[in-house]
Image (cartoon, rainbow, N blue to C red):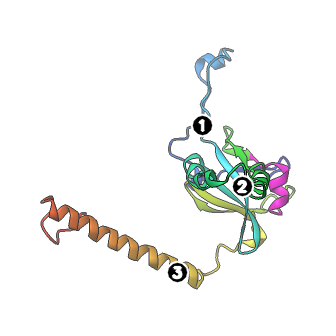
Amino acid sequence: MDKQRRLIMPKPWRLSTDKIAKPSAKEDEGDSSVPTEELTPFYLMPWTVEGKQVIYVFDVEEMAHVSANWENISPFSNDAQAHFMDYASRIQMVTMDSQWRFQLNTYLTKYAGLDPLRKDGVAFSGSWRWGLLLNADDWDADAPMNAATLSFMGEHDAHQKVRQEQLENVAASRGVLPPGAPLN
């Protein structure tokens, strides 16, 4: 992070649909009316993980998925509405500049305890459609995975195997594949 609270989006988080706009010949000739592409917006939200204040980062599709649950909040429920409005007002939408940088606002920088004077003070965790920004002192990339993470991975693997079997059974029942033939 630099003094202006700008961060560079790590390559694994960059979307394949995002292209950095390069100046065209017309722009070089002084024609400023040539439109430039804008990169996919990301949303930054304050959150807590294991008691630590972090910033969740979502792309547009993931933000739509996450915010779908918010439609259940009634505008007539003063208690829920006030908390929702306070929280939602702290969400920041960002886009990258031509150097894949984006700027954190002051609130989120302070919320996650990020030091704008410390160049290596921010850790990125996650990839593609969502992830976390957190204080680098709170993240050890070399730490072994804990038992809960390993259990989660095992459950996901088991779910994928059941899903694969269901797909194969449906394909076999429709005559697409002979029984027991793998899909790959």
Mark 3 and mark 1 lie on one chain; the one further toward the N terminus is 1
Closer-to-camera residue (5/46): 46
Closer-to-camera residue (75/111): 75
Magenta residue check for 106: yes
Q: Amino acid at mark 1?
A: Ile
Mark 3 crowdedness (10 Å alpha carbons): few <14, some 14-19, many ≥20:
few
Report x, y in % for residue 80. Answer: 74, 58
Q: Is residue 101 above or below residue 118?
A: above
Disc 3 and disc 1: Cα gap in Å? 37 Å
Q: How many badges with numbers are in the image?
A: 3
Report x, y in % for residue 126. Answer: 60, 62
Rendered image: mark on residue 20: 1
Q: Kindly state the secondary structure of the residue where label 3 is placed.
A: helix
Q: Nearer the viewer, mark 2 or mark 1?
A: 2
The quadrant in which the C terminus is found is bottom left
Rendered image: mark on residue 49: none
Q: Nearer the viewer, mark 2 or mark 3?
A: 2
| Magenta residue span | 103-113
Q: Residue lying furthest bottom in this view?
A: 147
- Is there CB contact under 8 Å for labels 3 and 1? no
Residue at figure coordinates x 75%, y 72% from the top left? 138
Report x, y in % for residue 49. Answer: 70, 70
Q: Amino acid at mark 3?
A: Leu
Rendered image: mark on residue 45: 2
Residue at figure coordinates x 59%, y 80% from the top left? 145
Q: Residue lying furthest front in this view?
A: 76
Mark 2 crowdedness (10 Å alpha carbons): few <14, some 14-19, many ≥20:
many
Residue at figure coordinates x 55%, y 38% from the top left? 19
Q: Along the horizontal axis of the image, is 86 left or right of 171?
A: right
Mark 2 and mark 1 lie on one chain; the one further toward the N terminus is 1
Mark 2 and mark 3 lie on one chain; the one further toward the N terminus is 2
> What residue is shown with label 3?
150
